[in-house]
Amino acid sequence: MNPLTETSATSPNNLYSRKNPFLAELLRHDRLTRPGSSKDTRHFVLNLDGSGLTYTPGDSLGAFGRNSPEVVDELISLLGFEPDASLKNGKGESTTLRRALSQDYTVNRASRKIMSALTQRIGQGEQRNRLMELVDNADLLSEYVDSRDYVDILKEFTEVRFESPEDFVTQLTPIVPRLYSIASSLDAHPREVHLCVAVVRYDTHGRAKKGLASGFFADHADMFVKNIPVYVQASRDFRLPKDNSTDIIMCGPGAGLAPFRAFIEQRVHDGATGRNWLIFGEQHRATDFLYGDELLEYQRSDKLHRLDLAFSRDQAHKIYVQHRMLEQSKELWTWLRNGAYFYVCGDAKHMAKDVHQTLIDITQKEGGLSPEAAREYVNNTLMRTERRYLRDVY
């Protein structure tokens, strides 16, 4: 995500923070992707009533996930300890093994630390030899750990013995919050916060696995129970223009649409006269058009002035958001030259890089600039001097 900072000392948000999260209640849980989609994207509505928490479009919600009960049970069985065995967690709090593995430590992905610990808790033999081969080879160890969780490892190294529950949990990494771009305007949805979450699911080593926070929200979060630890984390600069007459261009494929749903809701609420242009992409229109009915209604009512869609797999050749940008390069350049803000949200590794380069290409082509001047305009003038090119990428 963009650099983020906690809210100021005078904000009511300081009542709750990463160290002292609010226990929110899940009010709504909808599947956004339709049957037949290769993706699983969900819409969640959380109740903030009584928290004093406030947010502005562009902010993120920090949420602490919990581990899958099935994985926790299997891990406890492999360890050979009683689920209710008492211990102290990393905060020095008294708890049980089951509770600690459920909500205090990350168990869906293994860390390198555990491998060194295993070497000291396993006797001589073939399993130890295999373990030492891994530990002594940094590249091999990294590859091994990256695709496994603790269940996978303990199933392979069955001769490992931990002395106590605390002996095991001290090797684990504490759960950290997942930051989700908020997908709602507080003015449009008082006392609520909405999230658009792409659920991470994958298979490795013969077992189905899932992301910690997204899997918790999708499969294990109870409805109408105040037990989801959350807090608001404010953005430094991923903000709507202060002048409501300013045009905005929003580029958000997949769940990167989240903050732009909030932007549109806020602009509609405020009666902004500036135009809104959304460039959205996913795989298939029939199954992956997130918030499609909402967006089309905004378009019909002239609240979304341009809607360009890139469904990559609805034709023989793949079309992505950067291709739609190029198709509309003259119009996009005109908006930018007339003061529009350009926003992008989503994958930093591939999409955001492609969009960034496309913006430079459009600047060069439509602005008649040299490659060096185009890069200077995008990288410095737009991003740093005028701050009209803003990114929320991760």
Image: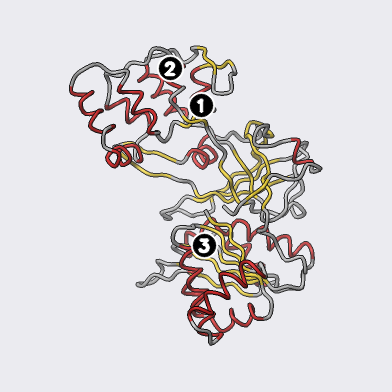
Q: Quadrant of the rendered structure where residue 177 is?
A: top right
Q: Give the distance between the C-alpha atoms of the residues marked 3 and 2, in whole angstroms.
A: 44 Å
Q: Residue furthest right?
A: 10
Tell me how far mark 1 sits from mark 2, CA to CA: 17 Å
**Above or below 170: residue 7:** below
- Crowding at dot 1, Cα within 10 Å, few <14 / some 14-19 / many 20+, comes out as many
Q: Is residue 126 above or below residue 218?
A: above
Residue 229: x and y in percent read 63, 34
In the image: residue 393, left or right of residue 127:
right
Mark 1 touches mark 3? (CB < 8 Å): no
Up/down of 234 relative to 239, above or below: above
User: Relative to the observer, which residue lies in front, 385 or 141?
Assistant: 385
How far apart, in angstroms, are the residues tagged by discs 1 and 3? 32 Å
User: Element type at marker 1?
Assistant: helix
As drawn, the residue found furthest toward the bottom would be 368
Q: Which structural element holds mark 3?
A: loop
Question: Which label is found at residue 253?
Answer: 3
Up/down of 39 relative to 13, above or below? below
| Residue 37 location (% of width, % of height) | 43, 55
Left or right: 83, with 336 as reference point: left
Name the mark nearer the viewer: 1 or 2: 2
**Residue that appears at 52% across and 37% down:** 216
Question: Residue drawn at (48%, 71%), measured in percent from left and top?
Answer: 357
Crowdedness near tag 2: few (<14), some (14–19) or many (≥20) residues, C-alpha within 10 Å: few
Q: Which mark is residue 102?
A: 1
Displayed quadrant of residue 258: bottom right
Mark 3 vs 2, N-terminal side: 2
Pointer 3 with pointer 2, Cβ within 8 A = no
According to the picture, the residue beneath numbered tag 2 turns out to be 167
